[in-house]
């Protein structure tokens, strides 16, 4: 279940796994399992959107909306995001309803998200370890992850450098990060960015932010308004 990569988000200490909870060996903080989801969120976020209350609707929307907008199946985007992953531990940041984890052949993935309802829904679909936590402060040990994915979420977040810093910290040397984002680089992307009230960020802005955190670009692919960008940890 990949418990060995867990770390206390409060103090960074090692944790021990008990029957119904995880306990920090250093600061003694306890993290409970809620509906099979490990709750390691330190600062509770009061954000409850429509999709959070209706995870099933989100699932249908992301598939139908994607197809209508791009004439391409959502599953083909996920295939692009997962391309290059063959073994080791995969961390899916902002996993939502677990769409990326569902495409894996094994339960070698870990999903993390802020939303407990989304994760509870995901739990009914996958066997992977699911954690409620912040992707700006991952409860994951440094250099423990082989492949990091973040599908269609990074463009919503304000502080992208924090996310990239954490992405870089948890990846093993030579580990790979694969993100899909809406960019302002084309008309559809600009329309979507404006519709969702997103900050204008180009493909190159993402690449520069990642580079500042020690992640080097090695592949990019544009699919309609979305860019799938892959980095490896380390400098060439
Ligand atoms: Zn602790």
Image (cartoon, grey):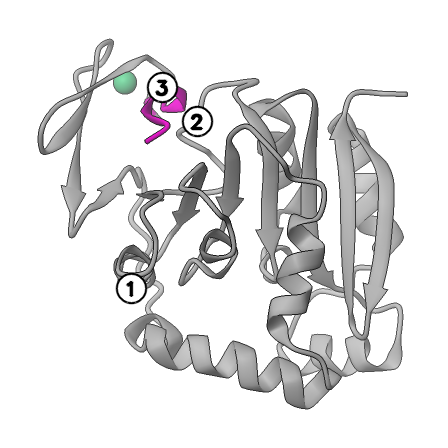
Other-residue count near label 1 (Cα within 10 Å), few / some / many at <14 / 14–19 / ≥20: some
| 49 versus 105 height, above or below | below
First in sequence, mark 3 or 1: give its number.
3
Which residue sits at x=16%, y=48%? 34
The answer for how far apart the CA atoms under marks 2 and 3 are is 9 Å
User: Would residue 122 be found to the left or right of residue 236 on screen?
Assistant: left
Residue picked out by circle 2 = 140
**Where, by quadrant of the figure, is residue 140 drawn?**
top left
Q: Of residues 210 and 176, which is closer to you in this image?
A: 176
Q: Quadrant of the C terminus?
A: top right
187 with respect to 100 (left or right): right
Residue 230: x, y in percent?
Answer: 77, 43
Q: Main secondary structure of the magenta part?
A: loop
SS type, badge 1? helix
Disc 3 crowd, CA 10 A, few/some/many (<14, 14-19, 20+):
few
Residue furthest to the front in view is 105
**Residue 4 got which mark?**
3
Q: Secondary structure at mark 2?
A: loop
**Mark closest to the chain's N terminus, 2 or 3:** 3
Q: Which mark is residue 136?
A: none
Q: Which quadrant contains ligand 1?
A: top left
In this rendering, does residue 104 appear at all?
Answer: yes
């Amino acid at each position: 279940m990949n418990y060995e990569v867990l770390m206390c988000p409060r103090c960074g200490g090692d944790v021990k796994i008990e029957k119904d909870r995880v306990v920090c060996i250093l600061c003694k903080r306890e993290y409970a399992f809620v509906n099979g989801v490990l709750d390691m969120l330190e600062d509770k976020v009061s954000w409850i959107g429509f999709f959070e209350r209706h995870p099933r609707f989100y699932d249908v929307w992301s598939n139908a909306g994607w197809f209508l907008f791009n004439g391409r199946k959502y599953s083909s985007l996920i295939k692009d995001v997962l391309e290059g992953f063959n073994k080791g531990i995969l961390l899916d940041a902002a996993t939502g309803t677990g769409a990326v984890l569902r495409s894996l052949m094994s339960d070698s993935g870990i999903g993390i998200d802020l939303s407990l309802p989304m994760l509870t829904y995901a739990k009914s679909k996958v066997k992977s370890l699911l954690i409620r936590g912040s992707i700006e402060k991952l409860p994951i040990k440094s250099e423990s992850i082989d492949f990091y994915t973040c599908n269609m979420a990074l463009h919503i977040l304000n502080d992208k450098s924090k996310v990239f810093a954490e992405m870089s910290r948890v990846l093993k040397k030579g580990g790979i990060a694969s993100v899909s984002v809406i960019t302002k680089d084309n008309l559809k992307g600009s329309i979507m960015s404006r519709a969702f009230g997103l900050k204008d960020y180009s493909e190159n802005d993402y690449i520069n932010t990642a580079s500042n955190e020690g992640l080097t670009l090695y592949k990019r692919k544009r699919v309609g308004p979305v860019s799938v960008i892959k980095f490896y940890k380390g400098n060439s």
